[in-house]
Amino acid sequence: MKTNNFKPHTVCVHGDATNAFDERTGSVSVPIYQSATFKHPGLYQSTGFDYSRMQNPTRLSLEKTVAALENGTEAFAYSTGMAAVANIAELFGIGDRIIASNDLYGGVIRLFRNVTEKNGVAIDFADTSDIGEIAKKITPNTKAVFIETPSNPMMDVADIKEIGLLAHKLKLLLIVDNTFLSPYFQQPLNQGADIVVHSGTKFLCGHNDTLSGFVIVKDAALGEKIRFLYKTIGACLAPFDSWLMIRGIKTLALRMEKQQENAFKICDFLLSRSDVKKVLYPGLPSSKGYAIMKKQTTGFGSMISFGVESADLAARILAGVKLISFAESLGGVETLITYPTVQTHADVPIAEREARGINDKLLRLSVGIEDAEDLIEDLKKAFK
């Protein structure tokens, strides 16, 4: 629980300021409690820590920090972002339905179609940037709406507040994937979301050196349901990875600002080229979701998708970048370029990919903290 009025920059560095584990030694850095189990003081007595699958001091410190950043009451740290989404899916049972963004990370689509639906929960995909389309998909068995905003990779923007009002009127849960903006730029719980999910591997970590996922809630009863699933399924984050996440989050605010600054400069470069046919970035005033972004966020992030004139040019760019790495993932200090049609969305049927605009001409950039001029020069050379 957030127990202070500190600003985000301070919370990133100091967490929620209630960590009492280190008072004896005065350690400035949260210790790594690399222990699988913990001693009981006596029968029916506990220090609050029994077994690291259920709770661990290092992970708890991280969870309190993430909960404070999202203004939630409780956060749960998972081994990966996919583990976090899979845990949420277990809240639903046979016959339930979930409305989900039709432009989600491909791994989530794969999970929903091959695991969640196998378990008897139906997924109704919709353009969640259109609240009217969401309303049309609602049935008596619908239990939740799952949105990613901005979406991956087409940068569609959903109105969290309006969707929340619709969902809560019908007693549905609103689940928001906040990976692309992080809690530094967007706090969905404040807009009406019930659950926030992150691939912590991305911006929260920020260094491409560990995997993690998070679920954050405000409602204590919902938190208890998730905690039961969390300890039962057991996909918890290890102590050392928790420490890496704590260290990464300390610079979240600085990284997000620099990455966004670079993203605007790269957008200007891409927009100046005749061989770039579209630039998808929610910070552009011409973007369809710009007005909503201005209303519900404090920034636009550093994810850019762009379409070039031919598949051949896309391939040449991927082969030609040197400073920028051709790699999956996003959100780290290093700039990465991704080819969604054969990487992040390879498991989505080709007809669906094409219908969404995810084709062999589309590239996605995760802009890092390097000098923008160096990044642009690298792109210029790759375009030739």
Image: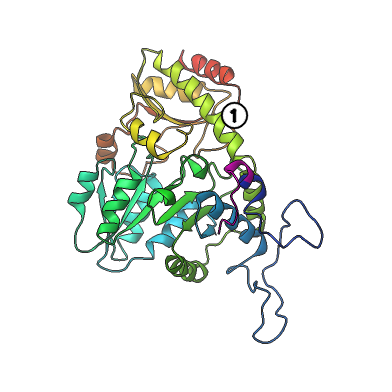
Q: Is residue 98 visible?
A: no
Name the colour scheme: rainbow
| Residue 361 found in image quarter | top left
Residue farthest to the right, as pictured? 25
From this view, report whether residue 283 is shown above or below residue 145: above
Q: Would residue 331 be counted in the magenta stretch?
A: no
Residue position for label 1:
369
Residue 338: x and y in percent read: 45, 33
Q: Would residue 9 be counted in the magenta stretch?
A: yes
From this view, report whether residue 335 is shown above or below residue 183: above
From this view, report whether residue 313 is shown above or below residue 51: above
Residue 308: x and y in percent read: 36, 21
Residue shown at the point (70%, 66%) measured from the top left: 35
Residue shown at the point (52%, 58%) measured from the top left: 75
The magenta-colored residue range is: 1-10
Check the picture and name the quadrant holding the N terminus: bottom right
Residue shown at the point (48%, 52%) measured from the top left: 81
Give the prevailing secondary structure in the magenta stretch. Answer: loop
* Residue 62 left/right relative to 381: right
Q: Nearer the viewer, residue 357 or 167?
A: 167
* Residue 123 left/right relative to 180: left
Q: Nearer the viewer, residue 144 or 111?
A: 144
Residue shown at the point (70%, 80%) measured from the top left: 40
Q: Is residue 210 visible?
A: yes
Residue 194: x and y in percent read: 39, 57
Residue 322: x and y in percent read: 57, 23
Mark 1: secondary structure: loop
Three-letter residue code for mark 1? Ile
Residue farthest to the front, as pictured? 5
